[in-house]
Image: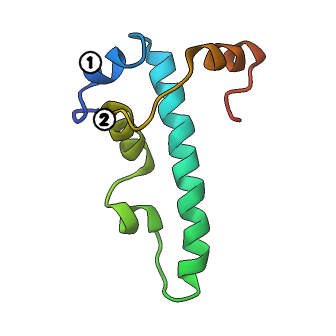
């Protein structure tokens, strides 16, 4: 799988040309999206049988949603706060 839309160069431009930063931000957001949608899935499961609520709800997987949010400016980060989390080894909070 490769990222074609949004283009990787555009995403890197928004994350200081740092692929690690890009992956960290996108994966953290994708986890948040996935957790949110899994919670919704529990409510939906009581009504109907759906295997993958993420795709049903949005038509996209969580990492694609996160990458699009990063490209359009919906998703951002505080560089100083991110640097502290990396130094502490706590990128999952």
- Please give the residue where the numbered disc 1 appears in the rendered image: 9
Give neighbour class at mark 2: few <14, some 14-19, many 20+ (Cα, 10 Å): few
The residue located at (23%, 27%) in the rendering is: 7
Task: Name the outermost residue toward the right.
Answer: 88
Relative vertical location of residue 92 with respect to residue 61 in this rendering, above or below:
above
The residue located at (36%, 43%) in the rendering is: 64
The residue located at (51%, 29%) in the rendering is: 25
Q: Is residue 28 left or right of residue 9?
A: right
Circle on res. 66: none
The residue located at (70%, 20%) in the rendering is: 85
The quadrant the C terminus occupies is top right
Give the secondary structure at mark 1.
helix
- Please give the residue where the numbered disc 2 appears in the rendered image: 72
Residue nearer the viewer, 91 or 52: 91
Q: From the image, state whether disc 1 or disc 2 is nearer to you.
A: 2
| Sequence-earlier tag: 1 or 2 | 1
Q: Which quarter of the figure has residue 38?
A: bottom right
Give the secondary structure at mark 2.
helix
Residue 89 x, y percent position in the rendering: 74, 20
Residue 44 x, y percent position in the rendering: 53, 80
């Amino acid at each position: 799988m490769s990222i074609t839309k949004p283009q990787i160069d555009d995403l890197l431009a928004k994350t200081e040309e740092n692929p690690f930063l890009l992956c960290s931000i996108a994966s953290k957001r994708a986890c948040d999206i996935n957790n949110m949608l899994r919670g919704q899935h529990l409510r939906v499961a009581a009504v109907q049988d759906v295997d993958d609520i993420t795709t049903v709800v949005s038509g996209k997987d969580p990492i694609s949603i996160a990458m699009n949010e990063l490209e359009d400016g919906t998703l951002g980060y505080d560089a100083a706060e991110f640097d502290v989390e990396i130094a502490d080894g706590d990128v999952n909070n």
